[in-house]
Amino acid sequence: MLLNKLLINYPYFAAVILFAVGAVIVLTRANLIKKLIGINIIESAVFLMFAAAGNIRGGVPPILDQTSPGRVYVNPLPSALMLTGIVVSVSVSALALSLVYRVYKAYGTLDARRIAEMKSEVRDRW
């Protein structure tokens, strides 16, 4: 019974698994690049969830056809919003990568724990 429900709702199940994997990466890794990859995985899970929510089984593309008025149409709004979200995500990822590069040039490491130690050492000197 539970397996049958999981198979029917596989896009939602895949989105939850992706979200969990991304969250584990963000919470357990100290490397800033790995954290950024985890955030991108979480974003992908959100995109998958919204795209799956806009889909209707047996639905057709939202092109009006006067010959068959009883058709069920797929909602195009979630897909359009996710395309916008993907564009924003790519630009935010590029900005984050440039910031990570600047952090690496300033501290010589990408380990968040080591960077925090270096910051506290500098604060203690002042």
Image (cartoon, rainbow, N blue to C red):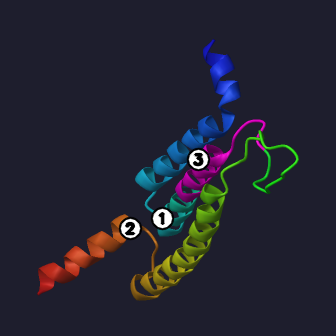
Which residue lies under the disc numbered 3? 49
Spatial CA span between label 2 and label 1: 6 Å
Rendered-image quadrant of the N terminus: top right
**Which one is nearer the viewer's eye here, 63 or 96?**
63
Classified by dominant secondary structure, the portion drawn in magenta counts as: helix
Marks 2,1: beta carbons within 8 A: yes
Comes first in the chain, label 3 or label 1: 1
Residue 63, compared with residue 72, is above or below; it is: below
> Which amino acid, by three-letter code, is at mark 1?
Asn
Q: Where is residue 40 in the image (x, y as percent from the top left)?
A: 56, 62
Residue 105, compared with residue 12, is above or below; it is: below
Please report the residue visible at 73 percent of the width from the left and 41 percent of the height from the top: 72
Marks 3,2: beta carbons within 8 A: no
Q: Where is residue 125 in the image (x, y as percent from the top left)?
A: 14, 84
Which residue lies under the disc numbered 2? 112
Q: Is mark 2 on a helix, strand or loop?
A: helix
Comes first in the chain, label 3 or label 2: 3
Spatial CA span between label 3 and label 1: 27 Å
Marks 3,1: beta carbons within 8 A: no
Quadrant in the picture for residue 30 = bottom left
